[in-house]
Image: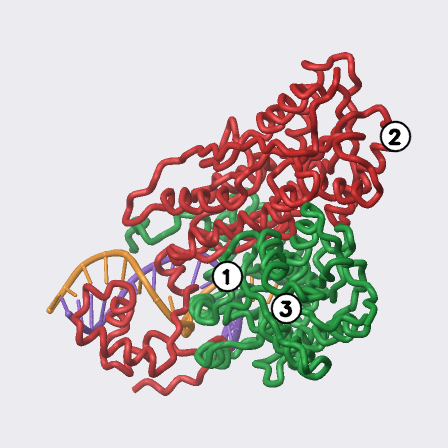
Chain colours: A red, B green, C orange, D purple
Amino acid sequence: MTAKRVPSRRSTRSVTLAEVAAHAGVSAQTVSRAIRQPSLVSEATVERVLASIRATGYVPNLAASHLASNRSNAIAVLIPTVSASVFADMVQGLDQAVSPGGYHLLIGTTGYRLDREEEVLRAFLGRRPDGIVLAGTVHTEASRELLAAARIPVIETWELAQDPVDSVVGFSNHDAMSALMDHVCGLGYRRPVLAGQFPPGDVRALRRRAAFEGGMARRVPEAPRRVFEMAGESSSLAIGADLFERVRREAPDADLVMFTSDAFAAGAILSANRQGVRVPHDLGITGFGGYDLGAHVSPQLTTVSVPSAAIGERAGHALIERIGANGRTGEPVTIDVGYTLVPGESVARRQG
Amino acid sequence: MTAKRVPSRRSTRSVTLAEVAAHAGVSAQTVSRAIRQPSLVSEATVERVLASIRATGYVPNLAASHLASNRSNAIAVLIPTVSASVFADMVQGLDQAVSPGGYHLLIGTTGYRLDREEEVLRAFLGRRPDGIVLAGTVHTEASRELLAAARIPVIETWELAQDPVDSVVGFSNHDAMSALMDHVCGLGYRRPVLAGQFPPGDVRALRRRAAFEGGMARRVPEAPRRVFEMAGESSSLAIGADLFERVRREAPDADLVMFTSDAFAAGAILSANRQGVRVPHDLGITGFGGYDLGAHVSPQLTTVSVPSAAIGERAGHALIERIGANGRTGEPVTIDVGYTLVPGESVARRQG
DNA sequence: TTGTATGCGTTATCAC
DNA sequence: GTGATAACGCATACAA
């Protein structure tokens, strides 16, 4: 005869499958089946089990489920910050895509640092997510090894990759920036400067800068390639205003300020409005990204728009496809979501 | 003699503690200890174990750890949407507060719907998070029961609660709105209207509306209490612009539009600028929340500012304190983060 | 300081 | 259609 076990400190003391089973007068296995594959259980039994679940207040322990089934139903998302609207929108799109499938989002922030990404990645892999979404296509060597060893679907985003880990949902930052340069050069701008933030881990911003410098070298080889950078973590609008101020002071001959993000550019436009600087008459402004605000400021911002939420959504669907079901898994994909040139009033045709 | 076991399909085929132990020539226990309590293991052994961990590429399975230790090191966060900057900022603050402690964030969105909150809550509780952060202090009855049964720390945010589930980090939306009304009424405004979105699940917005209506009844009892509402999910700036348009058309005698969020108000100001409506001369505008943009538009927005990121940070710290360590857990707390009246140029003294 | 036995709550597998 | 049993990978408790 077994002694009645004293509940150990280890136990959660929360309702378990076994208790539901006892309540319903069936085996634990039947309860499990009634929950996840009701078609395999008689209707009457399902009814009884569901009633017992309600009566006992049972909430399945997914950690145990995960351990036994080797599926976590979790998707890890690593982004630089939640506070930048582009990433927030991406997460929102991702959530909408995967939550109907029962997946939960595990979110980690890297602060635009690849070493932080590696650290967070290592920790998150401990949870054995069914898939991972990363912002960016450049990672530390160790990160790539971790991803390879994890043998789970990985979606890299916000860029295209020549050597993807697995799947990619992004666009060419270089081409988008080049398209914008084509546009403004076509309007007659000849002395543009670039302004933004370029932390070493923000490869996407660095790509845009490379496109700027390459484009300048090709189109206006005689002009200096001037890049204004600002460190710090104040608000994007304030940074944009500060950068604009600096450009006006330190590069008075510039005819155009190309910002690496719409938030900076919008901050510059708003600041110009307050200070009586006429855009585009005195100085042209462009942005990058398609932040909502750009369409509402006066003058309307000229920019290239990128579908942030769609990146999340498509990454989510690609991931679910890739994770697959009953043994069939999808193939790696590369999805180019493209970009859209958005001509605005913040630049205008220049007289040669 | 035991037959060598064939790796079943159940296995992750990833490196386990046992394999590291075999590699290092110690028991699994020693490996576990070397990782989490190195002080209890001899230095030489720790070295050897760490080397084996690197050599094998071991990544601890946290689901197993969770199951065995009854700690998930996960914190569940339920917010209406990630796309609203206030919630994004809160999540960012929360992440910064809890990630140093090794906690991971599980994020779910409710779309301002209490029934969705209940649904997501039920699913998330299956992961046995060590703590939960909720936006709002009003929940379905079932949600409250689930929370009570889970017996884990819960932090409700963005409001104060007369009957909190556990702990609270918020402020009084009612008082904040009233303070704003005091301010504008003191300036001489007598025919204000309220404009915003009021989904049934957005109790915070409803509180602000109640404060508006109560304040009107008290201060200008003779004036009609007009509230303009707009459904739909377009961008906040666009909604603000539309609402502003409607107010001008349908309430031409109004002297002030009080928006329920800064994003709406900023959209209205930007729209007014485009259309040549003079703010505050033709019509005053106020916001709510302290969205960065309000300080950058012209005229600067009059609003009450709320510390979004600080709500997340303080909720995170309160949660960690409340979860406790080695047997000692903190007490429930109620933290009022307050609000700050931000006088701007979007309202001005009226001649009686 | 290190090792052994056992349980955590669920699902895969196989038997009935 | 239902049940019994053995994993899943780790940490707690206790023994050595």
Q: Which residue is mark 2?
A: A250
Q: What chain letter is assigned to the residue under label 1? A: B
Which label's residue is closer to the chain start, 1 or 3?
A: 3
Neighbourhood count class around disc 1 (C-alpha, 10 Å): few under 14, some 14–19, many 20 upward: few
Q: What chain letter is assigned to the residue under label 2? A: A
Residue B95's spot in the image, x, y percent?
A: 64, 59
Q: Residue at x 52, y 55 (%)?
A: A106
Residue type marked 2: Glu
Residue A140's spot in the image, x, y percent?
A: 61, 37
Neighbourhood count class around disc 3 (C-alpha, 10 Å): few under 14, some 14–19, many 20 upward: many
A63 vs A234, left or right, is left
Q: Outermost residue toward the right?
A: A249
Q: Which residue is mark 3?
A: B194
Position of B37 relative to A204 (above/below): below
Q: Nearer the viewer, residue A181 or B62?
A: A181
Q: Is residue B241 visible?
A: yes
Nearer to us of marks 1 and 3 is 3
Residue type marked 3: Leu
Position of A243 relative to B69 (above/below): above
Q: Tag 3, which secondary structure?
A: strand
Q: Nearer the viewer, residue A197 or B181?
A: B181
Q: Residue at x 57, y 36 (%)?
A: A305
Residue at mark 2 shares a chain with residue at mark 3: no
Location of the N terminus of chain B by quadrant is bottom left
Q: Nearer the viewer, residue B259 or A150?
A: B259
- The label shown at residue B231 is 1
Q: Nearer the viewer, residue A94 or B5?
A: A94
Residue A304's spot in the image, x, y percent?
A: 60, 33
Q: Is residue B77 visible?
A: no
